[in-house]
Amino acid sequence: MNNKRIIVSLLIDNGDLVKGTKFKNHKYIGDPVNTVRIFNDKEVDELIILDKSASINGINYELINKITDEAFVPLSYGGGITTIEEIQKILSIGCEKIILNSVIFRNMDLIKDAGNLFGSQSVVLKIDVKKINNQYFIFVNNGTENINILLEDFLVKLNKYDFGELIISSIDLEGTYLGYDYKLYDFLSKKIYFPLIGDGGAGSLDDIQKLFEKTNLRACSVGSLFIFFGKNKAVLPNYPSSEIKDKISL
């Protein structure tokens, strides 16, 4: 049985679906609700919805509700979450998991409190990293602010917490089509006990296969590759058939 997941990650800004490169230069590419409907029809393994504007404008519950109405696959939401009440509302709307990012560096107790109330499996953490002088530093606020904390050091703290999964996003590779940071994920998968999701850099199905072959990861997150299609990068949501996906995930 294939238990590896190829997750589609979608980024929202002020209600629009957007895409950028290295967490910058985001451009409008479509309507998120319609895009979710298309991916649902393609029976993707899972969907991640990240709202980069929610930390400023507040969580758009109306949009989340419209998205969950179209998604009959597992759905995770991240963006602007700071309280237990917000988590409860998002889960009640129909999201299976919530994703905590910048907030965990201000309030790590939220990880524990959310896990105790809603189950650790519903709590996903996301850490955005950038390689500087051969070391990985953590960035927050949509990858704009270096908080001068080394990823390796922070993971020691995380080992004390119980949560579902951890997404490690490469700022350097996001949207570049250059492939995943295989050495990073291989190193991390041997160092920490919780499940990892690789994110940033997938440029082909071969890159996904390499991630599964070269590391112990059992899940990856993909954006541009499944949003754009062809040499001209036309906006055309796509996803491998079940037959092709099973071959990739062997």
Image (spheres, rainbow, N blue to C red):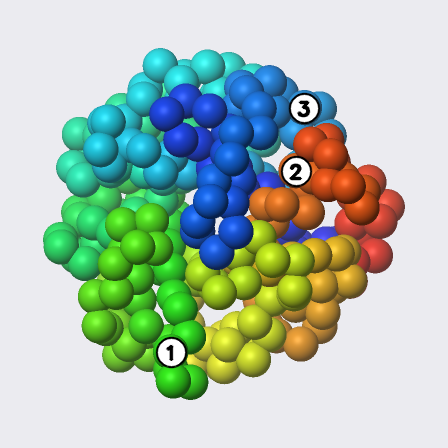
* Disc number for residue 132: 1
- Secondary structure beneath dot 2 equals helix
User: Could you tell me residue 38's position as x and y percent?
Assistant: 67, 24
Look at mark 3 in the image and give the residue it sits on.
38
User: Could you tell me residue 90's position as x and y percent?
Assistant: 32, 27
- The type of residue carrying mark 2 is Ile
- Residue for point 32% across, 33% down: 53
Of residues 221 and 226, which is closer to you in this image? 226
User: Could you tell me residue 60's position as x and y percent?
Assistant: 32, 22
Q: Is residue 239 above or below residue 93?
A: below
Inter-mark Cα distance, 3 to 2: 11 Å
| Neighbour tally class for label 2: few under 14, some 14-19, many 20 plus, Cα within 10 Å | many
| Neighbour tally class for label 3: few under 14, some 14-19, many 20 plus, Cα within 10 Å | some
Q: Is residue 41 above or below residue 209?
A: above
Earlier in the chain: of badge 3 and badge 2, it is: 3
Image quadrant occupied by the N terminus: bottom right
| Neighbour tally class for label 1: few under 14, some 14-19, many 20 plus, Cα within 10 Å | few
* Disc number for residue 227: 2
Q: Are marks 1 and 2 in contact (CB under 8 Å)?
A: no
Earlier in the chain: of badge 1 and badge 3, it is: 3
